[in-house]
Image: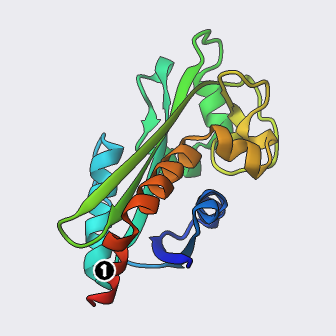
Amino acid sequence: MTLELLFATNNLNKVREAEFVLNKFGISLKTITVSKIEIQSNSLREIAIYAARSAYRAVRRPIIVEDSGLFIDALNGFPGPYSSYVYKTIGLNGILKLLDGVLNRKARFEAVVALAVNENDIYVFEGYVEGYISSEIKGSSGFGFDPIFIPIGCSETFGEMDIAKKTSYSHRGRAFRELGIWLTNNRDKVLIQDKAL
Protein backbone atom coordinates (compact mmCIF):
# COMPACT_ATOMS: atom_id res chain seq x y z
CA MET A 1 0.00 0.00 0.00
CA THR A 2 1.33 3.41 -0.95
CA LEU A 3 1.71 5.91 1.85
CA GLU A 4 0.75 9.47 0.90
CA LEU A 5 2.52 12.27 2.71
CA LEU A 6 1.81 15.98 2.61
CA PHE A 7 4.75 18.12 1.47
CA ALA A 8 4.55 21.82 2.29
CA THR A 9 6.32 23.50 -0.63
CA ASN A 10 5.74 25.57 -3.76
CA ASN A 11 8.97 24.35 -5.35
CA LEU A 12 8.04 21.73 -7.94
CA ASN A 13 11.71 20.93 -8.58
CA LYS A 14 12.09 19.84 -4.97
CA VAL A 15 8.91 17.76 -5.29
CA ARG A 16 10.21 15.98 -8.40
CA GLU A 17 13.48 15.04 -6.71
CA ALA A 18 11.78 13.98 -3.47
CA GLU A 19 9.24 11.83 -5.35
CA PHE A 20 11.99 10.23 -7.43
CA VAL A 21 13.60 9.00 -4.19
CA LEU A 22 10.48 8.22 -2.14
CA ASN A 23 8.61 6.31 -4.86
CA LYS A 24 11.14 3.50 -4.37
CA PHE A 25 9.90 3.23 -0.77
CA GLY A 26 6.21 3.14 -1.74
CA ILE A 27 5.64 6.74 -0.67
CA SER A 28 3.84 9.36 -2.73
CA LEU A 29 3.72 13.08 -2.03
CA LYS A 30 0.84 15.51 -2.13
CA THR A 31 2.01 19.10 -2.30
CA ILE A 32 0.16 21.61 -0.26
CA THR A 33 0.49 25.35 0.15
CA VAL A 34 0.33 26.32 3.80
CA SER A 35 1.41 29.47 5.53
CA LYS A 36 4.32 27.94 7.38
CA ILE A 37 6.54 30.24 9.39
CA GLU A 38 10.18 30.40 8.29
CA ILE A 39 12.28 31.88 11.05
CA GLN A 40 15.54 33.71 10.44
CA SER A 41 18.32 31.47 11.72
CA ASN A 42 21.80 30.30 10.78
CA SER A 43 20.62 26.71 11.38
CA LEU A 44 18.76 24.89 8.60
CA ARG A 45 17.68 22.35 11.23
CA GLU A 46 16.03 25.02 13.41
CA ILE A 47 14.34 26.57 10.38
CA ALA A 48 12.95 23.21 9.19
CA ILE A 49 11.70 22.12 12.62
CA TYR A 50 9.91 25.41 13.20
CA ALA A 51 8.40 25.35 9.72
CA ALA A 52 7.24 21.73 10.11
CA ARG A 53 5.56 22.50 13.42
CA SER A 54 3.77 25.55 12.00
CA ALA A 55 2.72 23.58 8.88
CA TYR A 56 1.33 20.80 11.09
CA ARG A 57 -0.69 23.36 13.09
CA ALA A 58 -2.23 24.58 9.83
CA VAL A 59 -3.32 21.15 8.51
CA ARG A 60 -3.40 18.88 11.61
CA ARG A 61 -1.98 15.99 9.58
CA PRO A 62 1.52 14.52 9.25
CA ILE A 63 3.48 16.81 6.94
CA ILE A 64 7.05 17.33 5.73
CA VAL A 65 9.06 20.42 4.93
CA GLU A 66 12.51 20.64 3.39
CA ASP A 67 15.08 23.38 3.68
CA SER A 68 18.46 23.46 2.03
CA GLY A 69 21.41 25.71 1.48
CA LEU A 70 24.74 26.14 -0.27
CA PHE A 71 27.67 26.79 2.09
CA ILE A 72 30.80 28.20 0.42
CA ASP A 73 34.07 27.95 2.40
CA ALA A 74 35.72 31.09 1.02
CA LEU A 75 32.59 33.11 1.87
CA ASN A 76 32.46 31.83 5.48
CA GLY A 77 29.49 29.58 4.73
CA PHE A 78 27.53 32.20 2.77
CA PRO A 79 24.84 32.00 1.44
CA GLY A 80 23.86 29.06 3.73
CA PRO A 81 20.26 29.33 4.99
CA TYR A 82 19.79 32.45 2.85
CA SER A 83 20.49 30.59 -0.42
CA SER A 84 17.02 31.05 -1.89
CA TYR A 85 17.08 34.81 -1.29
CA VAL A 86 20.65 35.13 -2.60
CA TYR A 87 19.75 33.13 -5.72
CA LYS A 88 16.80 35.44 -6.39
CA THR A 89 18.84 38.60 -5.82
CA ILE A 90 22.34 38.03 -7.24
CA GLY A 91 21.92 34.64 -8.95
CA LEU A 92 24.60 32.36 -10.33
CA ASN A 93 26.63 35.17 -11.85
CA GLY A 94 26.66 37.02 -8.53
CA ILE A 95 28.18 34.04 -6.72
CA LEU A 96 30.76 33.54 -9.50
CA LYS A 97 31.64 37.23 -9.25
CA LEU A 98 32.14 36.95 -5.47
CA LEU A 99 34.55 34.07 -6.11
CA ASP A 100 36.40 35.73 -8.97
CA GLY A 101 40.12 35.06 -8.46
CA VAL A 102 39.48 32.90 -5.37
CA LEU A 103 41.42 29.62 -5.41
CA ASN A 104 39.52 27.87 -2.60
CA ARG A 105 36.24 26.96 -4.27
CA LYS A 106 35.19 24.30 -1.76
CA ALA A 107 31.48 24.24 -0.94
CA ARG A 108 28.83 21.97 0.44
CA PHE A 109 25.11 21.59 -0.08
CA GLU A 110 23.01 20.68 2.95
CA ALA A 111 19.37 19.61 3.14
CA VAL A 112 17.12 19.09 6.14
CA VAL A 113 13.78 17.30 5.87
CA ALA A 114 11.52 17.66 8.91
CA LEU A 115 8.50 15.38 9.34
CA ALA A 116 5.91 16.62 11.82
CA VAL A 117 3.87 13.59 12.87
CA ASN A 118 2.10 15.81 15.38
CA GLU A 119 2.89 19.08 17.12
CA ASN A 120 5.43 17.51 19.46
CA ASP A 121 6.91 14.64 17.44
CA ILE A 122 9.11 16.06 14.71
CA TYR A 123 11.67 13.81 13.05
CA VAL A 124 14.63 15.31 11.20
CA PHE A 125 16.57 13.78 8.30
CA GLU A 126 19.70 15.44 6.98
CA GLY A 127 21.84 15.05 3.89
CA TYR A 128 24.92 16.83 2.64
CA VAL A 129 27.33 16.65 -0.25
CA GLU A 130 30.82 18.14 -0.46
CA GLY A 131 32.00 19.69 -3.70
CA TYR A 132 33.20 22.91 -5.20
CA ILE A 133 31.99 25.87 -7.21
CA SER A 134 32.77 25.68 -10.92
CA SER A 135 34.33 28.63 -12.72
CA GLU A 136 31.38 28.91 -15.12
CA ILE A 137 27.68 28.08 -15.40
CA LYS A 138 27.23 24.62 -16.92
CA GLY A 139 24.05 22.69 -17.65
CA SER A 140 20.36 23.50 -17.78
CA SER A 141 18.99 20.70 -15.59
CA GLY A 142 18.16 21.04 -11.93
CA PHE A 143 17.47 24.41 -10.38
CA GLY A 144 18.96 27.05 -8.11
CA PHE A 145 22.73 26.81 -7.78
CA ASP A 146 22.90 23.40 -9.51
CA PRO A 147 24.70 24.71 -12.64
CA ILE A 148 27.70 25.93 -10.61
CA PHE A 149 28.09 23.08 -8.07
CA ILE A 150 30.29 20.05 -8.83
CA PRO A 151 30.16 17.24 -6.25
CA ILE A 152 33.46 15.61 -5.27
CA GLY A 153 34.24 12.66 -7.53
CA CYS A 154 32.35 14.15 -10.49
CA SER A 155 33.30 16.24 -13.46
CA GLU A 156 29.76 17.54 -14.07
CA THR A 157 27.73 20.15 -12.24
CA PHE A 158 24.34 19.15 -10.84
CA GLY A 159 22.97 21.23 -13.71
CA GLU A 160 24.47 18.76 -16.20
CA MET A 161 23.03 15.65 -14.54
CA ASP A 162 19.71 13.91 -15.04
CA ILE A 163 17.50 13.46 -11.98
CA ALA A 164 18.66 9.87 -11.33
CA LYS A 165 22.33 10.84 -11.23
CA LYS A 166 21.75 14.04 -9.27
CA THR A 167 19.66 12.38 -6.54
CA SER A 168 22.27 9.62 -6.15
CA TYR A 169 24.80 12.29 -5.10
CA SER A 170 22.74 15.17 -3.80
CA HIS A 171 22.07 16.44 -0.31
CA ARG A 172 18.32 16.33 -0.99
CA GLY A 173 18.50 12.78 -2.35
CA ARG A 174 20.34 11.67 0.79
CA ALA A 175 17.94 13.39 3.20
CA PHE A 176 14.88 11.94 1.47
CA ARG A 177 16.46 8.47 1.38
CA GLU A 178 16.92 8.74 5.16
CA LEU A 179 13.23 9.67 5.46
CA GLY A 180 12.25 6.73 3.22
CA ILE A 181 14.28 4.27 5.32
CA TRP A 182 12.77 5.63 8.54
CA LEU A 183 9.22 5.43 7.16
CA THR A 184 9.80 1.83 6.03
CA ASN A 185 10.31 0.94 9.70
CA ASN A 186 7.90 3.46 11.28
CA ARG A 187 4.99 3.69 8.84
CA ASP A 188 2.48 2.98 11.60
CA LYS A 189 3.45 6.19 13.46
CA VAL A 190 2.35 8.27 10.50
CA LEU A 191 -0.74 6.18 9.65
CA ILE A 192 -2.00 6.10 13.25
CA GLN A 193 -1.64 9.87 13.56
CA ASP A 194 -3.41 10.40 10.24
CA LYS A 195 -6.35 8.15 11.15
CA ALA A 196 -6.72 9.80 14.55
CA LEU A 197 -7.75 13.07 12.89
Residue drawn at (74%, 34%) of the image: 157
Residue drawn at (46%, 79%) of the image: 33
Q: In the picture provided, is 97 more to the left or to the right than 85?
A: right
Q: In the picture provided, is 121 more to the left or to the right than 166?
A: left
Q: Toward which corner of the image does residue 131 lie, by quadrant?
A: top right
Residue drawn at (41%, 22%) of the image: 76
> In the rendered view, would you say 113 is above or below 152?
below
Residue drawn at (31%, 63%) of the image: 51
- Residue 196 point in image, percent of width and height: 26, 88
The quadrant of the picture occupied by the C terminus is bottom left
Q: Residues within 10 Å of mark 1 (few under 14, many from 20)?
A: few
> In the rendered view, would you say 15 is above or below 56?
above
The quadrant of the picture occupied by the N terminus is bottom right
- Residue 130 point in image, percent of width and height: 55, 26
The residue type indicated by label 1 comes to: Ile
- Residue 141 point in image, percent of width and height: 78, 49
Residue bearing mark 1: 192
Out of 146 and 45, give the one closest to the viewer.
45
Please, what secondary structure does the residue beneath circle 1 have? helix
